[in-house]
Amino acid sequence: MKRISAFFTDLMETIVISLSIFLVVYLFFMQPHQVNGQSMVPNFHSGDYVLTDKISYKLGEPQRGDIIVFHAPPAANCAKGTGCDFIKRILGLPGETIEVKDETIYVDGQPLAEPYLPADLETLPGLYTQNGAITLEADEYFAVGDNRPHSSDSRSWGPVKENEIVGKAFFRYWPLDDVGSIQGATYSF
């Protein structure tokens, strides 16, 4: 009887310790997210699973080209209580002026070359950017989906506030044929 009791005690200790470690990692270091929708095609597809690093932006600033996960803004009209998060690419940084014209995104008057997008992809202004250039505040980022015609993003509802960013997507673990680290884009200005 003592052996059975010791076995169950050890089992419970292992389960409690494992759950505690998982909870700490989930709450403070990284979190899984599922891509829902077509806004990041061709680079991410609906049903892809990624891990989001929640520490990087506590130690440093988000960079242009980073793929971020953030809480959806109220203007995105997500159902209440769903914990709706979006995944997009940062194209504009705090203090920069962004303009969408001639099917191109301009940063401080310079066209942004985006070689990761299909050449025939249309980038049109949205409700927020239709009246010309906008200047980002000190805590704002301009985040846009890679599939511009099918993305609800900063062009439509404005910049993402820094405190709304959950973290940086750094690893795709599903589907198995696309498993690997996620690299942000680099730009030449």
Image (spheres, helix red, strand yellow):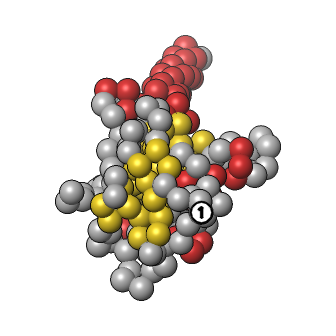
- Furthest toward the left, the residue is 188
How many numbered discs?
Answer: 1
Q: In this rendered view, identify the residue nearer to me: 17 or 57.
A: 57
Question: Which quarter of the image is occupied by the C terminus?
Answer: bottom left
Identity of the residue drawn at 49% across and 78% down: 122
Instruction: Single out the residue that lies furthest toward the top.
Output: 2
The answer to whether any part of residue 97 appears in the image is yes
Asked if 82 appears above or below 149 in the picture, the reply is above
For the point 63% across and 52% down, which residue is it? 157
For the residue labelled by badge 1, is the local secondary structure a helix, a strand or a loop? loop
Given residues 7 and 65, the one toward you in this image is 65
- In the rendered image of this protein, does residue 24 appear above or below residue 67? above
Q: Nearer the viewer, residue 168 or 22?
A: 168
Residue furthest right as drawn: 80
**188 left or right of 123 in image:** left
Q: Which residue is mark 1?
A: 130
Q: Residues within 10 Å of mark 1 (few under 14, many from 20)?
A: some
Q: In the image, what residue occupies the spot 30% across and 31% down? A: 60
Rendered-image quadrant of the N terminus? top right
Residue 176 visible, this orientation:
no
Q: Give the image quarter of residue 186.
A: bottom left
Q: Position of residue 115 (x, y in %)?
A: 29, 72
Residue displayed at 38% across by 61% down: 106
Q: Relative to the observer, which residue lies in front, 14 or 148?
A: 148
Q: Specify the amino acid type for callout 1.
A: Gln
Percent across and percent down for residue 62 are 36, 40
Locate residue 107, reporting x and y percent.
36, 55
Q: From the top left corner, tell me how far across and down residue 156 is, in percent.
A: 62, 58
